[in-house]
Image (spheres, rainbow, N blue to C red):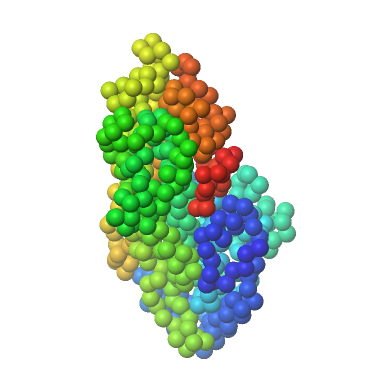
């Protein structure tokens, strides 16, 4: 059970809630803050004070005063008009994360919503009812308006939801679960949609997948090192301590641990003096990606616990300030940084694939073919990896450097952070497929060398991987192998964690 406070949510907790469906509760102290903030809004309405988003229009309409009798309709109209996202829905796990992060932000007590709103969000989480939210349509300021409007629609009993593996109208599922739709009151619609929870939820899922993928890069690279009889000296601790990057040192240590006991690896001078960069510089390149991932994690965990709507209510309603915490620039830049970091893992992996299949660069059978010439073996798998790496170069173009004014130039600089987070997710999926191809080729290479000479850790990986991808004894439809290994790696993401040890069981 995870208790939400609005202050202390971690990525590890998000992982348990969103992937393992751990139940969530709300701290009593946070609920009291919500109640106090709501009383402040009710007093503002009663005192007929003019406050943005409570009794005014939105964006360019901020100077339009709304009559008392229309305040509730203002919020309903806001949600319906802004729910105009397009394209494929976000993955269901991202939708679940979005509900969680919006709930956590509202619990900070600066948004002026009623307790019934946070309790409704909590019900969605614990009932595993997840809004269907289109991916496209957010500028990343004023927050993720379109995606979060689709989330808010569900609280009203409108829109569609993911439920038990299928998509249904919200009304149908609310009836099954006995859930009552909410009727929005002053400030509540704006509080639900002004924020960065779409890009941040996508970002958290990205980070979980990318960090676990980065560990998988290391064990697959270890397998490749054995297949190519790589030189272990390049991972000597003194080299990496001399440079001083903690992440680089950590990668080198894990590689040494994984290769402990291997009779396939060589020492400098035995077969060659130096390996190519794609082997020799694994700690430097992978380590740099880890540096970026560490930066991204720090920004995400701040944003997950941030108040990002507008206006915010302080000092019992005596101070109500319109600001710009909804602007997604911190996450936009973090997502762009992540895109580059993860894309590089595939870039260096593809170069290792080339070394595994190119007969001019190794002493293995050409293209790892069972019958070179008659059978092409892994030749075109390298093409596929090169294509995915090239596609990543396009996707890695920073989204955050773009801005298009909106709302009649009132909102004249936006972050495009949600675009960045979506592209990061696409890159991660491409990287996993490139790694699957390296894995298939490395499995074949160590088999040619003799698996009895493998390190215990890589041997355990090899044996489990062979249950997913059989030896290449003749040409076959390798697309099926790539997809099977890709899915296997993705399922094992929740097993290979930051506490990875060489003795881990690969299952």
* Residue 433 horizontal/vertical position (percent): 43, 36
Q: Which residue occupies 54% across, 84% down?
A: 40
Q: Is residue 176 above or below residue 104?
A: above
Q: Residue at x 28, y 31 (%)?
A: 272
Front one among 102 and 356: 356
Residue depicted at x 51% and y 27%: 452
Toward the top, the furthest residue is 374
Question: Residue 202 at x, y = what percent?
Answer: 46, 54
Looking at the rendering, in which quadrant would you find the C terminus?
top right
Answer whether residue 27 is visible to the viewer in this image: yes
Q: Residue at x 52, y 53 (%)?
A: 499
Please determine whether, in this image, residue 470 is positioned above or below residue 28. above
Position of 200 with respect to 388 (left or right) is right
Evaluate whether residue 139 shows in this view.
no
**Residue 89's spot in the image, x, y percent?**
50, 48
Q: Nearer the viewer, residue 9 or 222?
A: 222
Q: Nearer the viewer, residue 195 or 227?
A: 227
């Amino acid at each position: 059970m995870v208790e939400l406070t609005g202050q202390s949510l971690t990525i590890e907790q998000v992982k348990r809630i969103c992937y393992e469906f751990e139940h969530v509760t709300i701290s009593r102290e946070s609920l009291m803050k919500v109640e106090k903030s709501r009383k402040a809004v009710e007093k503002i309405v009663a005192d007929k004070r003019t406050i943005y988003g409570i009794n005014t229009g939105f964006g360019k309409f901020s100077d339009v005063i709304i009559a008392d009798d229309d305040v509730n309709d203002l919020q309903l109209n806001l949600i319906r008009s802004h729910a105009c996202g397009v394209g494929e829905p976000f993955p269901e796990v991202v939708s679940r994360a979005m509900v969680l992060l919006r709930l956590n932000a509202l619990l900070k007590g600066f948004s002026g919503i009623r307790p019934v709103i946070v309790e409704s969000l909590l019900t969605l989480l614990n009932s595993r009812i997840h809004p269907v939210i289109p991916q496209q349509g957010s500028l990343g300021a004023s927050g993720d308006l379109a995606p979060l409007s689709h989330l808010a629609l569900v609280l009203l009993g409108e829109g569609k939801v993911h439920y038990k593996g299928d998509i249904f109208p919200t009304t149908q599922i609310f009836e099954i679960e006995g859930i009552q739709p909410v009727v929005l009151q002053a400030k509540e619609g704006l509080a639900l949609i002004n924020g960065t929870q779409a890009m941040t939820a996508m970002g958290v899922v990205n980070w979980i997948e990318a960090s676990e993928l980065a560990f998988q890069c290391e064990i697959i690279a270890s397998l490749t090192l054995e297949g190519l009889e790589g030189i272990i000296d390049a991972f000597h601790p003194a080299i990496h301590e001399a440079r001083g990057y903690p992440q680089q040192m950590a990668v080198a240590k894990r590689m040494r641990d994984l290769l402990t006991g291997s009779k396939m690896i060589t020492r400098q001078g035995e077969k060659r003096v130096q390996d190519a960069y794609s082997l020799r510089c694994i700690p430097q390149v992978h380590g740099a990606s880890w540096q970026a991932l560490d930066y991204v994690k720090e920004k995400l965990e701040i944003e997950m616990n941030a108040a990002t709507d507008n206006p915010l209510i302080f000092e019992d309603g005596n101070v109500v300030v319109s600001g710009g915490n909804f602007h997604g620039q911190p996450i936009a830049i973090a997502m762009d940084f992540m895109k580059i970091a993860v894309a590089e893992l595939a870039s260096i992996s593809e170069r290792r694939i080339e070394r595994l299949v190119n007969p001019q660069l190794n002493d293995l059978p050409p293209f790892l073919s069972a019958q070179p010439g008659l059978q092409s073996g892994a030749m075109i798998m390298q093409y596929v990896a090169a294509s995915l790496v090239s596609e990543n170069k396009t996707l890695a173009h920073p989204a955050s450097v773009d801005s298009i004014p909106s709302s009649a130039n009132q909102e004249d600089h936006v972050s495009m952070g949600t675009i960045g987070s979506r592209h990061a997710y696409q890159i991660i999926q491409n990287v996993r497929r490139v790694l699957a191809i390296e894995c298939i080729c490395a499995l074949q290479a160590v088999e040619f060398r003799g698996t009895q000479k493998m390190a215990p850790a890589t041997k355990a990986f090899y044996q489990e991987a062979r249950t997913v991808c059989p030896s290449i004894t003749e040409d076959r439809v390798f697309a099926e192998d790539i997809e099977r290994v890709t899915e296997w790696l993705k399922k094992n993401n929740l097993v290979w964690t930051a506490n990875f040890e060489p003795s881990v069981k690969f299952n």
